[in-house]
Amino acid sequence: MVRETDDLELKRRPEAEEDLEDLALGEDYALNPGYVPMVADALDRGDAERLRELLGALHPADIADLMGFLSAGDREELVPHLDAETLGEVLSELDTEIREEILEHVPSALLAQALGEMESDDAADVVDDLEADKRAQVLAAMPETERAAIETTLAYEDETAGRLMQREVVAAPQFWTVGQTIDHLRANSDELPELFFDVYVVDPSYRPVGAAPVSHLLRTKRDTPLAQIMEQVTEIPVDMDQEEVAYIFNKYRLISAPVVEPGGRLVGQITVDDIVGVIQEETEEDILALAGVGDAGRDAGVVGIIRSRLPWLVINLATEAIAATVVGAFQDEIAKLTALAVLMPIVSSLGGNAGTQALTVAVRAIASRELNSSNAMRVIWRELAVGVFNGATMGGLLGIAAYMIWHDIRLSIVVGLAVLANFFVAALGGILAPIALERLGRDPAVSSSVVVTFMCDFFGFLALLGLGALILL
């Protein structure tokens, strides 16, 4: 059954007048929503020629984006229309959930060809998503050299430099000249990595002693020894966590870096295009963790989303129940002065927002290595000063509002002091909770929000009701 599409989308213009690339992408390089039904319509009609036109106008990254908007059935039908090279590039760009689904339907022979077109690190990521039986079939269909590279990469721990690196590198002995190096590159062009920025200069034990940027090679005389133009390198241990690798790349503004095994031998390289993905991945994880949710992609199921969110809601329910005991302890006072019941959620909410601000700043500072034991006290005092000032300001404003409504100066004082106290606690919790969790070896982004929310609710209720009992009754 053919899908209904807009008249503009079904109208076929002469090929010379049709600019599919402009039709596919907006000015922000995002896929236009109207392009998706055009592809789906061609799939429904089995129009292979039209599909080639539509897909030919897209970059592999845009095809991967398109996959996310198509149904599972359409994705399965689309894959056979991709050649091995394009399929490999698309697979490396896909979300994990969608990629795992697509891999179930790709023939082993075609997948082996696609993997052969990919860098070793990207190919290893794809193979890692395969079921054991199909993985064995695909690897068996690959040339021995490519298979060995993938198997070696998979032997490293996930999210380490070993899994992130590509094994294809360009290395030269330090006694070579620029001319010898360039001649070697030209003579072995088929074996070079698809993307590289440096020629690593190695000693007889194949340990990197420097790096000669390609840009320097091209503008240096042929008889110049590599040892004269090589630059110092920042070596990445093969077992280093990828988040640490991203930090090093960002700090030293690296474009590429050699990866070495424990003995110092060169085993691969990491390039900046890999690091961009890591930074985005780690940032998304921290943002989602702060909210207590998992990564719910476009095709995430209801059950999976529930499993990622419900546990944190249960924990939050338990902490809120503890905070509610404060309200129960002061129920007689609340019955005598209903204004306290009206003001409780306001005081608690203001403190929670202040705590979230301090918490977000602290988690970001820890993640970017801007906060450690050397400056922790200074940052803590700064946040406390900000909390006290903002608490005094907001407490004063709320106190004035309370006086205008209830015309009771003592109530205004209680409200102002309660807000001030809660802001102090919020600032203290917002900065101390992530620091403490980080010291304990826990991810500060995961649990801090629950702790800060509990502290703000508990002490907000306690401050307002306790002061109300002392001053008003």
Image: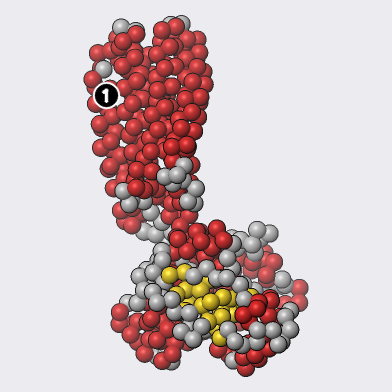
Check disc 1 and report its element: helix, strand or loop.
Answer: helix
To which residue does mark 1 refer? 326
The relative height of residue 470 versus residue 168 in the rendered view (above or below) is above
Residue 59 visible? The answer is no
Q: Residues within 10 Å of mark 1 (few under 14, many from 20)?
A: some
Residue at position x 34%, y 14% in the image: 467
Residue at position x 38%, y 81% in the image: 152
Instruction: List x then y, in percent, for residue 119.
Output: 50, 79
Which residue is the extreme one toward the bottom? 187
The relative height of residue 469 versus residue 241 in the rendered view (above or below) is above
Instruction: List x then y, in percent, for residue 333.
Output: 28, 12
Q: Quadrant of the C terminus?
A: top left
Instruction: List x then y, in percent, for residue 80.
Output: 49, 82
Quarter of the view holding residue 40: bottom right
Residue at position x 58%, y 76% in the image: 211
Decide if residue 66 is on the left or right side of residue 288. right
Residue 468 visible? The answer is yes
Q: Nearer the viewer, residue 391 or 304?
A: 391
Decide if residue 406 is on the left or right side of residue 231. left
Q: Nearer the viewer, residue 3 or 175?
A: 175
Which residue is the extreme one toward the right? 17
Quarter of the view holding residue 23: bottom right
Decide if residue 202 is on the left or right side of residue 76. right
Residue type at the position of mark 1 = Val
The relative height of residue 331 versus residue 183 in the rendered view (above or below) is above
The relative height of residue 362 versus residue 425 in the rendered view (above or below) is below
Residue at position x 24%, y 22% in the image: 328
Instruction: List x then y, in percent, for residue 134.
Output: 34, 82
